[in-house]
Image (cartoon, helix red, strand yellow):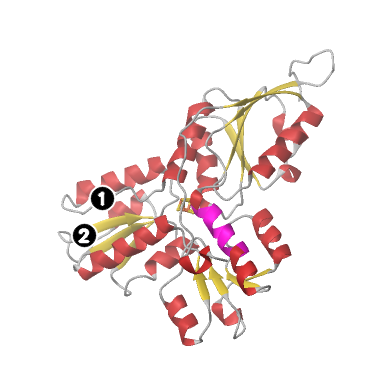
Amino acid sequence: MDGAPTLASDKPLLDLLIAAPRGFCAGVDRAIRIVELSIEKYGAPVYVRHEIVHNRHVVDALRAKGAIFVEELDDVPDGVPVVFSAHGVPKAVPHKAAERGLDYIDATCPLVSKVHRQAERLVQTGQHILFIGHRGHPEVVGTLGQVPAGTMTLIETNEDAEAIMPADPTNLAFLTQTTLSVDDTAQVVATLKRRFPSIQAPRGEDICYATSNRQAAVKDIAAQCDAMLVIGAPNSSNSVRLVEVASRAGIRAQLIESAANLELSWLDGVRTLGISAGASAPELLVRELVDLLKVHFTVSEREMNGAVETMVFKLPRTLEAA
Ligand code: SF4
């Protein structure tokens, strides 16, 4: 905190610019509600395959209500309901659940399901898909698992886009993971379009509204900040992208899971701090961070203006009356 101006109260001054929108998106809201309603309907325990959303706070809260999180369907005992996470699952997973006679509830975000349906349609029309995404992310595993092996090729970087040699360069389409960097993806898409002018683009944008809005909000305030803290989990793709956006704007940026992970020395020399939160991070974690900062600084807090989000997704019909 060296060199920061102080008031007579002796605490250093810190201006907070809170990005908006931030935090929960409609897909995360829906997925959490699905687990809660499943527990109401079936009674605890309800099994959830993979973290329902990538946030430990959310997972712990649902665990306390009666959810049991497992990584594979094989870890779910017979005769109990299972929820599939917001990231989506390969087709083989619901098939296997049906074979075992399990009641399953799919919490896949409708915007991820939309990409799944597009992939199926493209394969039906005989097009080879170049899928832009991060290897190993559950959403990517789920999307690759919608179509037969060999019909979709993963493109992770611009270098991949430059190097790919498809069997038929005139019969290609591309799709993307929903939580990518808007800027990086634009570069990869430009490369693909330059190399394969007839490549078919998705009907609408695959990067979802929540990802784009949160990145734009961080970009908008970065120029006014000395540093940026993003609340989110290290395995949350959209949270990690927010840190990248801030870093590229030329400021120090760090991902923290919660206020408890903040090292105060990181704020040395910071007078204006930006704060955002990934789409799976609850607002409570933002408030805890602000409260902690108030203990150590004389804080002025400004909520910034950004895109207004009104998206709400319907719940699965089987749970509506729960
Ligand atoms: Fe759906 Fe986007 Fe939220 Fe992912 S980040 S759950 S795709 S709305």
Inspect the image, locate mark 2, and give the three-letter code of the amino acid beneath it.
Answer: Leu
Whole-percent x, y for residue 41 in the image: 61, 70
Q: Tell me whether circle 2 and circle 1 mark residues in contact (CB < 8 Å).
A: yes
- Split into 4 quadrants, where in the image is the N terminus? top right
Dot label at residue 12: none
Q: Which residues are magenta?
A: 27-36
Q: Is residue 207 magenta?
A: no
Q: On the image, numbered disc 2 is attached to which residue?
A: 172
Answer yes or no: is residue 136 visible: no
Q: Secondary structure at mark 2?
A: strand
Residue 117 against residue 214 in the figure, above or below: below
Give the residue at the far right of this rendering. 9
Label 2: few (<14), some or many (≥20) within 10 Å?
many
Give the residue at the far top of this rendering. 8
Q: Quadrant of residue 50?
A: bottom right
Q: Earlier in the sequence, mark 2 or mark 1?
A: 2
Give the residue at the far front of this rendering. 321
Inspect the image, locate mark 1, and give the three-letter code of the amino acid beneath it.
Answer: Leu
Seen from the viewer's position, the closer of residues 161 and 146 is 146
Q: Secondary structure at mark 1?
A: helix
Residue 17 against residue 108 in the figure, above or below: above
Q: Overall secondary structure of the magenta stretch?
A: helix
Q: On the image, numbered disc 1 is attached to which residue?
A: 192
Whole-percent x, y for residue 93 in the image: 46, 76
Q: Nearer the viewer, mark 2 or mark 1?
A: 2
